[in-house]
Image: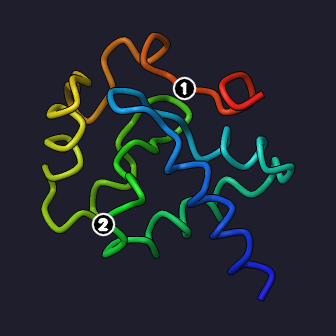
């Protein structure tokens, strides 16, 4: 039951990531007061496929790598979704990661 509530909290944060921006698993975990739960955020992202209102493609690892791309149905789907939003991706890495990074701790004050 606890993880289900955590997953819902994760989804609430992910729904607020603006188009054309990305954040990381760890940043979401820290924002939710569970800094050591980045992996659990990843599990939440893996479990939300089929939920069109949760833009999981906007969540990447702490270095801007598309580490969850294998869960999008094709190896290029995550990149394609990001590029449709104006995010540049090269070799599975977000280009200019610092400038497109979104931090809920500052954005959702």
Compared with 93, 50 (above or below) is below
Q: Are marks 2 and 1 in contact (CB under 8 Å)?
A: no
Q: Is residue 87 left or right of residue 43?
A: left
Residue 102's mark? 1
How much space separates mark 2 and mark 1, taking CA atoms? Answer: 22 Å
Whole-percent x, y for residue 10 in the image = 63, 58
- Local packing at callout 1 (Cα closer than 10 Å; few below 14, some 14-19, many 20+) is many
Residue 15's mark? none
Q: How many numbered discs sit on the rendered protein?
A: 2
The residue under the point 49% across, 50% down is: 15
Whole-percent x, y for residue 64 in the image = 43, 30
Quadrant for residue 94, please give it. top left
Assign a secondary structure to mark 1: loop
Number of the front mark, 2 or 1: 1
Q: Nearer the viewer, residue 104 or 98?
A: 104
Q: Nearer the viewer, residue 28 or 93?
A: 28
The residue under the point 35% across, 32% down is: 19
Which quadrant holds the N terminus? bottom right
Please give the residue where the numbered disc 2 appears in the rendered image.
71
Q: Earlier in the sequence, mark 2 or mark 1?
A: 2
Assign a secondary structure to mark 2: helix
Residue furthest to the bottom:
1
Which quadrant holds the C terminus? top right
Q: Is residue 94 left or right of residue 85?
A: right
């Amino acid at each position: 039951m606890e993880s289900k509530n955590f997953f819902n909290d994760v989804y609430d944060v992910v729904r607020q990531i603006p188009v054309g921006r990305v954040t990381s698993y760890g940043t979401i975990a820290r924002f939710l007061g569970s800094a050591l739960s980045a992996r659990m955020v990843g599990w939440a992202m893996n479990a939300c496929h089929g939920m069109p209102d949760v833009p999981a493609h906007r969540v990447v690892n702490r270095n801007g790598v598309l580490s969850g791309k294998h869960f999008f149905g094709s190896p290029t789907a995550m990149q394609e979704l990001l590029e449709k939003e104006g995010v540049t991706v090269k070799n599975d890495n977000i280009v200019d990661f610092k400038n497109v990074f979104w931090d809920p701790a500052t954005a959702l004050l």
